[in-house]
Each structure stands twice: as C-alpha cells, then as structure tokens.
Image: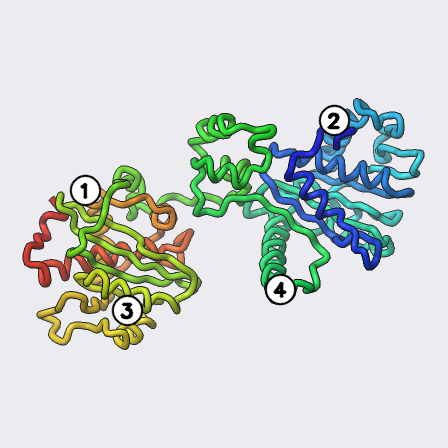
Amino acid sequence: MERLGAPPMPWQKYVSDVALEIDPATGRFAHREVGLSVSRQQGKTELCLAAQVHRALAFPGQNIVYAAQTRNDARKRWEDEFWEKISGSSLAKYARIRKSNGNEAILWPGKRSRMGITANTERAAHGPPLDLGFVDEAFAHEDDRLEQAFSPAMLTRPMAQLWWASAGGTTKSVWLNKKRETGRALIEALWEALAENPEAVRPSAAYFEWYAPEDMPRDDPATWRATLPALGHTVTEEIIRSELEKMAADPSAFDRAYLNRTRKPTPPSDPNVPKDKWPGLVDADSKPVADSVALAIDVSQDRASSSIAAASLRPDGKVHLEVVARRPGTDWVVPAVAKLHKLWRPVAVAVASSGAPARSLIDDLAAAGIESPKDRAKPQRGDLAVMRAGDITEACGQLADAMNQGTIRHLDQVPLTAAVNGARTRRNGDAWQLDRTASLVDISPLCATTFARWALLIRGPQVLEDYDALDSVL
C-alpha cells in the first residue's frame, strides 16, 4: 500500500494482518475466505487493490480475478483506478496492461501472475485454476452465482482465497445480507468458544464489519467514530455532518452510505399513529413523580425481548412516559418488576392478557405478590391491572389522542422512538390496536408505555387522593 501511494490506515493494516495470517502448522493462509463490510469512502478500494497486487508479487504464477456490479463496472475500476495507481507508482516497472476486449489483464511477467476481470455470471472464472477471487460491491449481487463459480476453480490451489467487500445494501442484496449474517454468527460463536477454550478451532473465514445498529443515533459523532474507521484520517466529522444535512430528506440513504446499515423499503406511515407529533413531545429533563407511577410490561411477539415502562403524572399535568428497562428474553422481567414494585410502590402494574405475549407472565407476577385486586371496585396501590381486549383498544386510542393534544412527555429513548416510527395498527371493530405482527420493529416499548399510561389514568383516581384525571388531558 505504501508503494502504491496509499499508506495503510490502522483499520486497513488490521484487516491485512488478520486476513493474510499464515497457519504455522501448514504454512498456508489461515483463512480461505475474507469478508469485509465497511461504509463508503473509507479506503476499501485501496485495500482491494493492494490485496491483489500483494498476491501477484508475493507468489509466482498467480491467477487473480476481480468482479464488481457488472463486467463494465469491473473494467472501469480496473482500468481507471487500479491501473492508474499501479502505473503511477514505483511498481509500474514490474507490470504491463493488456486492454483487448474479453482478454483484459494487468500482467506481472516477472512472477507470471495476472490480474483479470470477469462478469457476474455463472460462467465467471471458468478456465485455469483460481488463486484469488475478489467480489467487490457485493451489495449488487442478488445471488451466489459468483461464489459458486469461483469456489470450484480454487479447489486445487492450497493458498486460494475468496475475498468479498461491500458497503451495506438493500433488502434485495440477498447474497451480501446472508454473508453479513453468517459473519456475525461466526464472530459470536468464536467469542463463546474462546471464552471456554483458548485453543478452540477457529473458522476458516475471516470477517470484518463496521456498522451502526439501529439503536445508535445517526446524528451522534460517537456513532460515526464507532462505525467510520477512516474518520480522523481521510474523513472529518464536519464532512459527515454536512452529508447528514444534505441527506435529511432521506436519512436511510445516509444510514446505508455512512452507517453501513441495510436500506429497507419505507412503507406509508400508519395514519393511526401520529408519529409526526412525537419529536415535539421530547423533554430531556422530564422525571417521574415518585408517588404517582404506574408500571407496565410487554413482550415482543417472538419473545426475544421484553420491556418495562413507567407513566407518571407530573405537577404540570403532563404524563411522563419512560422505558425503564428493555432486555433480551423474559426470565428477568418478573424479578425486575418485583424490585421496582417494592422501590416505587406503583399505582398499578399493567399487563395485557387478550392474545398478548406477556400474558404468560401473569401467574409468575401473582406468585411474586403482584396480584389482581381482590375487590375489582376497590383496587389497592400496586395491584395488577390485567387488560382485556377493550382495555387495550381504549389505551391505544388514548395514547394517540395524547400525542395529538401534546399532553405527554418523553425522553426520546431510542427503542421507544423507533417503536413509534415503526408501529403499525390493525382494526378492532371501528377502533384499532397496535399490531405486533405488521409493525416494522419490535413495538413492545411502545405497547408497554401505552399500557402504563392507561393504568395511570384508570387506577390513579382510585388509589391517589389528589389525582385529577383531567390534568392529563387539559
């Protein structure tokens, strides 16, 4: 990279150091596959070129094939970028270019190596054995035809490697999305295996990824520093901030380009959820009032995560909404609620029972001492509020009204805001309910806060002497 005029940034050196590790037991590369998923304009092209030139010069008789979105795209990068960098460097004396259509190659006569290009077809790389196959801009490949073409050609080459590289794609980027999912799973499995046994067998694939999960805010410089490895080297925070401003009308484009997120189609907003009102209801200094707190729990449809939320009547009559906790699974919920119950002495603890995933926790809550009122007409502070279908419908409509009327305040917590933006509803007679199945994200944080507010409104007047329900709607 230094001789090509692009000294490696720390992240590029890290990838190179690991991707080209030699297994001392075999003397061969430790990794037969190298995957790289990184945002745009981070130096991926320089690393791709260097990996190919290194292969051509480090070993004799190497056959290297490069592919991009299409053959034309591959040729444009190969001729306009790769050859330009090589011909302008001190390595130019070792190489020559052949531009004849269908037989394009950068040749390294001293090593009898060649760097060619190919099309994105099932016939790609058919011919001589392949030492290095490079699939660039993997987001454009909707199937595994290139991998299926490259892999058999590498079978007899002991030092063969398949490299692929790309920024985030879309939901149509089937091959890339599968590779990213597999790479993450490999990392998690290796992490667990090494924790138990430092000598655990390592996978033959190396995977590198820089990206921002959905709960990292796109406008936070800390997010950029965590996901843009070239930041501070060839990119500045001011430039990224400018890009965010330019893409304000289409933030998903910024997410894909600079946060390496998969761009998903954005369906029309649900008219029942006034999410445009949500940003105006933020109050970062809002706090619950200790003696007027209602709690609620909800579980995601797949039971992968659960949420505990609180609603509290503030002195100014607004209702404070907050996600108190959101964690994987369900086993932690009842102990956490029991602890909060003892600490806060809530007005009530709400849980939906009519077809809701959290219904399974009702018996455990009762066993923990959080039970339904013995006399439904005279509930006590801290009793369980089991919500039926009508209660759920009522709570959903009430929250929508509160958003439109500006009578709630929240902290702009990422899981809750994401749930509001991704929520979808279903009809229930002439009214509606939040729909976990159709929603774009896990809406358990929104369901929990909706139910907590309902419990505060319904149980508050019965257990709080100074509670005035009109305060929360005026």
Q: Earlier in the sequence, mark 4 or mark 2?
A: 2
**Of the image marks 2 and 3, the number of the one nearer the N terminus:** 2
Name the element at disc 3: loop
Q: Position of residue 216 (x, y in %)?
A: 45, 44
Residue 190 in the image: above or below residue 4: below
Q: Secondary structure at mark 4?
A: helix
Q: CA distance from mark 1 to mark 3?
A: 28 Å
Residue that badge 2 annotates: 5
Q: Which residue is mark 1?
A: 405
Residue 239 on image: x %, y %? 51, 26
Residue 155 location, quadrant: bottom right
At which x and y percent is residue 256? 53, 39
- Given this view, does label 4 or label 3 mark the residue nearer the observer? 4
Please give the name of the residue rendered at 84% of the width and 31% of the height, measured from the top-left corner: 101
The residues tagged by marks 1 and 2 sit, at their Cα atoms, a distance apart of 60 Å
Labelled pair 4, 2 in contact (Cβ < 8 Å): no
- Quickly name the residue at label 4: 193
Q: Is residue 177 left or right of residue 252?
A: right
- Mark 4 → mark 3, Cα distance in angstroms: 40 Å
Q: Which residue is mark 3?
A: 353
- Helix, strand or loop at label 1? It is helix
Q: CA distance from mark 4 to mark 1?
A: 53 Å
Mark with earlier residue (1, 3): 3
Horizontal arrangement in the rendering, residue 143 relative to residue 461 (left or right): right
Q: CA distance from mark 2 to mark 3?
A: 65 Å
Q: Are marks 1 and 2 in contact (CB under 8 Å)?
A: no
Residue 316 on image: x %, y %: 13, 43
